[in-house]
């Protein structure tokens, strides 16, 4: 069960990750965006004489940073230099959610033969304690 503070932190962080994924997809648009449930992408590859081959649609796992949730309703990342300064003393407390409490998972991949680029348009938030990364690409969020 997530605490109230964890739920707030998770919601806040998911929104940031969704915005970042949207921005990445605009700045560096994929050619195709299959649903993130897929693990492989099969296509008729021009680099393979038009013959169907598949490539990995690999998981990208973004680990949540340490997040502070203050009673005054401010939520933000708490790097080491902010420890002791946030959550605010005056606000009669707050909670620190440890790094890696959540993961944001989306998928991307590229065909090595024709350079077809794939990235999902959406991702999902997972419980970082129960759902560890399964792919090679792990990013600190
Ligand atoms: Zn290809
Ligand atoms: Zn506060």
Image: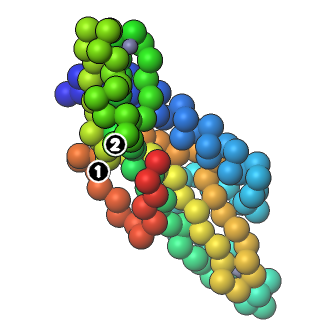
Q: Secondary structure at mark 2?
A: helix
The residue nearer to you, when weighing 19 against 30, is 19
* Outermost residue, left side: 1
The answer to whether marks 2 and 1 mark residues whose Cβ atoms lie closer than 8 Å is no
Residue 53, percent across and down? 63, 82
Residue found at x 23% / y 46%:
129
Q: Earlier in the sequence, mark 2 or mark 1?
A: 2
Position above or below: 121 against 70:
below
Left or right: 2 with respect to 102?
left
The residue nearer to you, when weighing 121 against 87, is 87
Local crowd at mark 1 within 10 Å, few (<14), some, or many (≥20)?
few
The residue nearer to you, when weighing 40 against 103, is 103
Q: Secondary structure at mark 1?
A: loop
- On residue 80, the disc is 2
Residue found at x 76% / y 87%:
47
The colour scheme applied to this rendered structure is rainbow
Question: For the N terminus, which image quadrant?
Answer: top left
Residue 115, percent across and down? 73, 77
The residue nearer to you, when weighing 74 against 80, is 80
- On residue 131, the disc is 1
Q: Is residue 126 visible?
A: no
Indicate which quadrant contains ligand 1.
bottom right
Q: Is residue 120 visible?
A: yes
Residue found at x 70% / y 86%:
113
Q: CA distance from mark 2 to mark 1?
A: 25 Å
Left or right: 114 with respect to 17?
right
* Outermost residue, bottom side: 49
Residue 120, percent across and down? 61, 53
| Disc 2 within 8 angstroms of ligand 2 (CB) | no
Residue found at x 35% / y 63%:
134
């Amino acid at each position: 069960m997530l605490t109230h503070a964890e739920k707030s932190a998770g919601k806040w962080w998911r929104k940031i990750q969704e915005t970042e994924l949207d921005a990445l997809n605009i700045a560096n648009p994929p050619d195709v965006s299959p649903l993130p449930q897929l693990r492989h992408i099969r296509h008729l590859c021009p680099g393979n004489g038009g013959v169907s081959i598949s490539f990995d649609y690999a998981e990208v796992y973004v680990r949540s940073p340490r997040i502070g949730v203050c009673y005054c309703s401010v939520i933000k990342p708490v790097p080491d230099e902010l420890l002791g300064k946030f959550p605010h003393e005056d606000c009669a407390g707050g909670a620190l959610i440890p790094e890696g409490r959540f993961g944001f998972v989306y998928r991307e991949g590229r065909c090595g033969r024709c350079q077809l680029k794939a990235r999902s348009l959406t991702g999902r938030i997972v419980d970082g304690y129960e759902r560890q990364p399964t792919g090679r690409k792990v990013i600190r969020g």
